[in-house]
Image (cartoon, grey):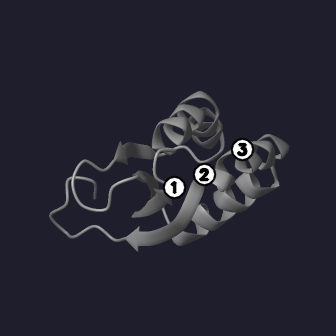
Amino acid sequence: MIVEQRDYHVYTGKLPELVQLYEAVGIPLQEEILGGLVGAFTTDVGALSTYTTLWRYASHAEREEKRARLQTDERWKTFLAQVQPLMHTQQNRILVPTSFSPLR
């Protein structure tokens, strides 16, 4: 199992708009295609105006297949056109659980 951490730094003042769009459109669509949502978060301390999601996959291959399917979905393309202007930067990480992780 792997967990993908996706961090989006949003332009100052735009975080509520981005979160609302993800709640209404993005997350339901991602859950339909990707499944495995571990959680969605905003930052209270540190790098403010950051939106983070964690997604669980059985393997790198499963992640690649599902992400490719998401990228070709016309509904996702429409959603991206709405949220991309709100984002400043993005960072992704693949997290591998330790032998003692509860998510293992």
- 77 w.r.t. 65: above or below: above
- Which residue does the image show at 24% across and 61% down from the upper left? 46
Single out the mark in the foreground, 3 or 1. 1
Q: Quadrant of the N terminus?
A: bottom left
Give, as a three-letter code, the residue at label 1.
Answer: Tyr
Cα gap from disc 3 to disc 2, whole angstroms: 8 Å
Asked if the residues shown at circle 1 and circle 2 are in contact, with their CB atoms under 8 angstroms apart, the answer is yes
Q: Residues within 10 Å of mark 1 (few under 14, many from 20)?
A: some
The residue that disc 3 covers is 82
Quarter location, residue 48: bottom left
- For residue 46, above or below residue 27: below
Badge 1 or badge 2: first in the primary sequence:
1
SS category of the residue bearing label 3: helix
5 up-or-down from 42: above or below: below
Q: Disc 2 marks which residue?
A: 86
Tell me what residue is drawn at x 67 percent, y 55 percent.
84
| Residue wearing tag 1 | 11
